Amino acid sequence: MPSSSSFNRRGFLTSAGVTAAAAALGGRASAAPPSGEKPNAAQGVELRWLGEAPRASTGTAWGVPWPKGQLAKDTSFALTGSDGTHIPVQSWPLAYWPDGTLKWSGHAVGSNALAKTFHLSPGTPAAPQQPVTASRQGNAIRMANGTVEVRIATEGTIAIRSMTRGGRSTAEEGRLVLLMQDRPDDENTSPRRSNWTGVVERAEIEQTGPVRAVIKIAGRYRQDHGSKHGVGGRAILPWTMRFYLAAGDESMRLVHNFTWDADMNHDFVRGLGLELTVPMADEAHNRHIRFGTTEGGVWSEPVRVLTGLRRDPGAAVREAQFAGTATPAVSQWSQEVREGYRKLAQWNDVTLFQESSAHFVIRKRTTSAGSWLHHAGRGQRASGFGYVGGVSGGLGVGMRDFWQRFPRSLDMRGAAGDRATVTLWSWSPDAGAMDLRHYDTTAHGLDLAYEDVQDGFSRPEGICRSTEMELWALDSTPTRDQVAALSGALTERPQLVTKPEWYHGAGVFGRWSLPDRSTPGRVALENSIDRDVAFYAGQVEQREWYGFWHYGDVMHTYDSDRHEWRYDVGGYAWDNGELGSDAMLWYAFLRSGDPAAFRLARAMTQHISEVDTYHAGRFAGLGSRHNVSHWGDGAKEARVGESFTKRFSYYLTADELLGDLIRSSLRADKTLLTVEPLREVLPPQDKAPTRLRIGPDWYALVSNWMTEWERTGDTRWRDRIVTGMKDIAKFPAGLFTGEAGGAVGFDPETAHLVNLGKGDYQGGYNLAMAFCGEQILWETLDLVDVPEFRRTYLDFARYAQAPSEEKIERYGFDFDPKVFKTIYSRVTAWAGEQLGDPVIRQRGWNRFTSDPNGQPWPEPVRVGGNSVASPVDEIPTERTENQSGDFATCSTNDAAQRTLAIISLLDIAPDEGP
């Protein structure tokens, strides 16, 4: 949170009120309004592509929500294209309603599903012409679909044994490679370097077809000793890799993810990739290397170049080399070329290196004994697609988010020999060593730098990062049009979605509205949401918020004097999803269908769930507060790693890796035993195993438990929620319990909360609802039946922003919770909705519209000339002080909380809105 906006963490911890006891309100309230007309699941749902329909696809997976009580959990589905074609689809449950009916279903199709729109409905799916299968055969798993056959190892140093098409081997000996060194590049002494191999330790078949097969393998990296791969004793960077093969497809999708567990002071990654061997059969002049760009461009050259010679080989030869097709027989070439072509250079090695988000270079050489030609090609953004092979076939490779997650490279070696080597470098060795150390060795303080660095806490152990790859078994050199089309499938991931009205009507993700432009005031609010999404999309591009560890994040607070976001000022730098910036983007997409909002949100969710959240080690299940280094801040919080905001992406895309990462957040329960959230604020206590705040800490745990319950149907997780709700309902002060923002005891074994008997009504409760706490409770209250907690929550919501006279009438005395208006505007309005009181509903709107930090931003202005290195857009703001007395300027917290308030208020209190 910002010390530059009204939503400030220091203010949360120091604001105070007076003590009192809370009594439960009578009657039962509902978390949702009376339901309107719901979608009819029996009639099915219309699907469309996110953005434009793709020219080519590598298959896709997506999720669909279903209203409560309408579909049995084992419902099967049929898919029909807009042209009337019955399309094979594979379906599976993602989540269940408490009554056991289907809440979310996951679906997958192959690359042949290219209709403009689709209709998904309960029914019998069409059978693929050639189903994909997956089966164990000895120490390998075989996947086959009638076009491609792949063998995946269940153990050892070779992950991909082979990939064949039509009996011809396209790729072999696929090995995960890791290059390490023992010190950073900028030290005076030369680093000691070592090579490592990812050793497969276990494998499982997750889906067996018939439309899509999924295999998951896992292992760790071990050091190579000479030609012996992966034989070292030390094992580091545990990894997983999933393989996806769809019926009839010529490509296989791979998702690799590693978790950092090495020593950041002595282990520096120099290269991380997947290496494959490609058998080469055609003559050198009929072998080709091709790369694609994001703009549809193609770089293509043969291993032996026959164009541009002193003597013309003939137009047909030149045209074939440009097209990537077989040249006429040598006997048909001109005599001079026919007699001398074997003396021509053979370009054995070619590398494309994306060195930044705005530039790539291509270099090539004939042999390791010769120099590189570093000017073979250049451009702005490579698509991540590459090909090495000949006119009779070869291997296509690709990496998604190629330029966004620079430094990356595609490396082709030995293309003139019998066996070429291709390496997809997710971290390119051309970039220098990865340095995960914190940006400084000293802390710079909360008071000025807003930085909460603590000794031994600025560490990356337990964070992870994934890379998505694609391998094509091609039966010929891809045409230039084909390279451009496949590049498009990499850069604009094909994704199916449905209309906002369906998502809204299904009753998922809490309380949110569809766009409402019925009055001038609402037009202004809706425009502000659209403008904010567009502004952040533009800032990502303009400020180049890209890179292996950075992509997906945005900055926290702006420095209007430097015309730069505060990238180097403590807690004002990377945002790490603070105050719901990810939720802001997801709700913006759900209600609009905007592709820009979806892509920003998906990248942000991927970043927060991987880079900002710990999945192993000391901080497992927690995440890091905003900082110059993503993992640098000492505040390790359950609110960063919580599941609520990750569920959007998981359920909409059916992403298995994200499902794994969400599940690992359950580890936060026990991690809180040793990493207590209030350890720096309050003295130790001995009434409970550990201590947390009701909000946001317990709310975050509730979101984790709720997600696991709905994914599995295991009521043990529901029971943990109910246990805490009943405990809170028994506290005399209810949700006003506890000092320092709601401190209570917590027992991870039983999930019981303990009243510590200190500071009721005195804590300051801004943090409680600042991280989608209200949405977590609204959705949970629709799933569990705990009347006493409903009344307790309603009491809190009713009086958190009530006038003094109303609090005195209710409690017998006045107190000031010191809550910020915008954050609590929707809670207040919800209380009015539940009580049928338009005055309280209006109060919620009034708190929002009267808050300077809740006001829509003005249009961005362009700053240029000698004020900046290059022109930038910024929000013009005046210097003010917020409620915590902090220097205020443009902050992402303001944008997030403003947008979330608008979206909720229009649903909860539509009649009282402007």
Image (cartoon, rainbow, N blue to C red):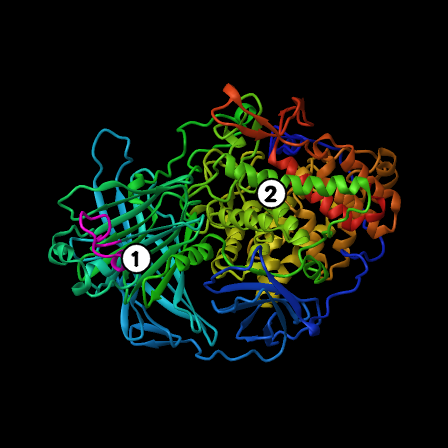
Residue for point 48% across, 65% down: 59
Residue 29: image x %, image y %? 81, 56
Give the side of residue 623 with respect to residue 344, left or right: right
Residue for point 79% across, 52% down: 791
Let me know if residue 254 appears in the view: yes
Give the side of residue 801 with respect to residue 206, left or right: right
Which residue is outermost to the top?
866
Query: Which disc number belongs to residue 581?
Result: 2
Within 10 Å of the Cα at label 2, are there few (<14), some (14-19), or many (20+) other Cα atoms?
many
Q: Amino acid at mark 2?
A: Ser
Whether residue 840 is situated above or below residue 890 in the rendered picture: below
Mark in front: 2 vs 1: 1
SS assignment at label 1: helix
Give the side of residue 735 with respect to residue 165, left or right: right
Q: Quadrant of the N terminus?
A: top right
Q: Quadrant of the C terminus?
A: top right
Residue 145: image x %, image y %? 40, 75
Count of labels in the image: 2
Residue 307: image x %, image y %? 24, 51
Q: Amino acid at mark 1?
A: Glu
| Residue, disc 1 | 319
